[in-house]
Amino acid sequence: MAGTKLNPLFRGDSREYTLAFTDSEGSVVNIGDWTVYFTLKKYAWKSDEEADVKKDITEHTNPSQGQTKIVLISSDTEGLRTGIYSYDIQIKKADGTIITILSGTLEIKADITRRTD
């Protein structure tokens, strides 16, 4: 699935994205030996080293049931500028196969409240 627009996120907020993997017949896939990559960039042409947010998930919520989470915490998003960002989610299987499973945009909105204590 390409071109998926995620719900807007306020700068400084946390969010979790739950992923569940199945094969073409709908059967659960064991993802215990997979790495899931989430990359968010204001400018898609930037290198991954310059990504605004990047997550490498190797410990999954329930790998034998094909479930994992991408967790963005407040510190991941608090320094982001407002605007539209590009993201993708890739998987890397144990055999080295890399597949982009989702890509699209995420709007970062300005938060009004900046104090947290």
Image (cartoon, rainbow, N blue to C red):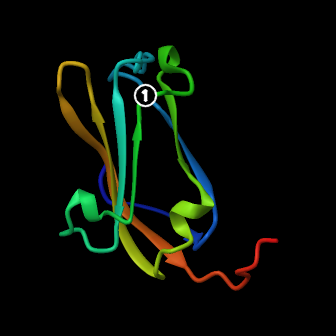
Q: Is residue 5 left or right of residue 88?
A: right
* x then y, percent, for residue 87: 35, 59
Q: Quadrant of residue 105?
A: bottom left
Q: Is residue 26 left or right of residue 94?
A: right
What residue is shown at x 49% (from left), y 14% (from top)? Answer: 64
What residue is shown at x 41% (from left), y 30% (from top)? Answer: 58
Image quadrant in which the C terminus is located: bottom right
* x then y, percent, for residue 26: 42, 21
* x then y, percent, for residue 86: 33, 66
Q: Residues within 10 Å of mark 1 (few under 14, many from 20)?
A: some
Q: Is residue 53 left or right of residue 117?
A: left
Give the labeled residue for mark 1. 21
Q: Nearer the viewer, residue 48 or 23?
A: 48
What residue is shown at x 27% (from left), y 65% (from top)? Answer: 50
Residue 90 to residue 115: above or below: above
What residue is shown at x 34% (from left), y 31% (from top)? Answer: 35
Mark 1 lies on a secondary structure that is: loop
